Image (cartoon, rainbow, N blue to C red):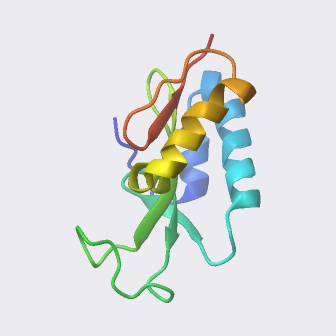
């Protein structure tokens, strides 16, 4: 279910108690490590880090009124999702990520095109 939050603080406050600590830690890590110039905002009902129009005026090709998405995080019913558009767009990055994942994370990689899903247990 997509969040109706309009601010990052509101989104963080509505994350369920069982996911809150892990989600806030993920948000903090992403925010600390995102390159300069990206903007944190609510994007597609998630917390997104986007390339603002001031840096990329063309915006997102599917809807140029929106800024270009780069990464996003979402607290879903059964998992925490991390979306990375570069993994979807860059096959070499995808291959690198898939090979590195087991070296750093327990459990099997649960991944869609650009979505990495983290579940409890």
Q: Decide: is 71 above or below 66.
A: above
Determine the residue positioned at 56% across, 16% down. 108
Determine the residue positioned at 44% across, 39% down. 115
Residue 64: image x %, image y %?
A: 27, 78
Asked whether residue 78 appears in the rendered view, the answer is yes
Q: Residue furthest left?
A: 62
Is residue 9 found left or right of 87 in the rendered image?
right
Residue 18: image x %, image y %?
A: 63, 21
Determine the residue positioned at 68% across, 69% down. 35
> Foreground residue, 7 or 108?
108
Quarter of the picture containing the N terminus is top left
Q: How many marks?
A: 0
Quadrant of the rendered image containing residue 66: bottom left
Quarter of the picture containing the C terminus is top right
Asked whether residue 73 appears in the rendered view, the answer is no
Is residue 112 found left or right of 55 in the rendered image?
left
Determine the residue positioned at 57% across, 56% down. 8
> Foreground residue, 104 or 1?
104
Residue 6: image x %, image y %?
A: 45, 59
Is residue 103 found left or right of 91 in the rendered image?
right
Q: Decide: is 104 above or below 33.
A: above
Q: Decide: is 46 above or below 35.
A: above
Quadrant of the rendered image containing residue 34: bottom right
> Foreground residue, 2 or 61?
61
Q: Decide: is 4 above or below 50.
A: above
Residue 50: image x %, image y %?
A: 50, 68
> Foreground residue, 109 or 40?
109
Is residue 71 found left or right of 100 in the rendered image?
left
């Amino acid at each position: 279910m997509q969040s109706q939050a309009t601010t990052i603080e509101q989104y963080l406050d509505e994350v369920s108690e069982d996911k809150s600590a892990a989600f806030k830690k993920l948000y903090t890590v992403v925010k600390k490590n995102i390159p300069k110039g990206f903007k944190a905002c609510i994007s597609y009902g998630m917390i997104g880090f986007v390339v603002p129009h001031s840096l990329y005026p063309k915006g997102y090709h599917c809807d140029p009124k929106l800024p270009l998405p780069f990464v996003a995080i979402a607290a879903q019913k059964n998992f925490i999702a991390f979306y990375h558009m570069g993994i979807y767009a860059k096959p070499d990055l995808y291959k690198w990520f898939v090979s590195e994942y087991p070296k750093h994370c327990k459990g099997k990689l649960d991944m869609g095109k650009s979505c990495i899903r983290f579940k409890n247990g």
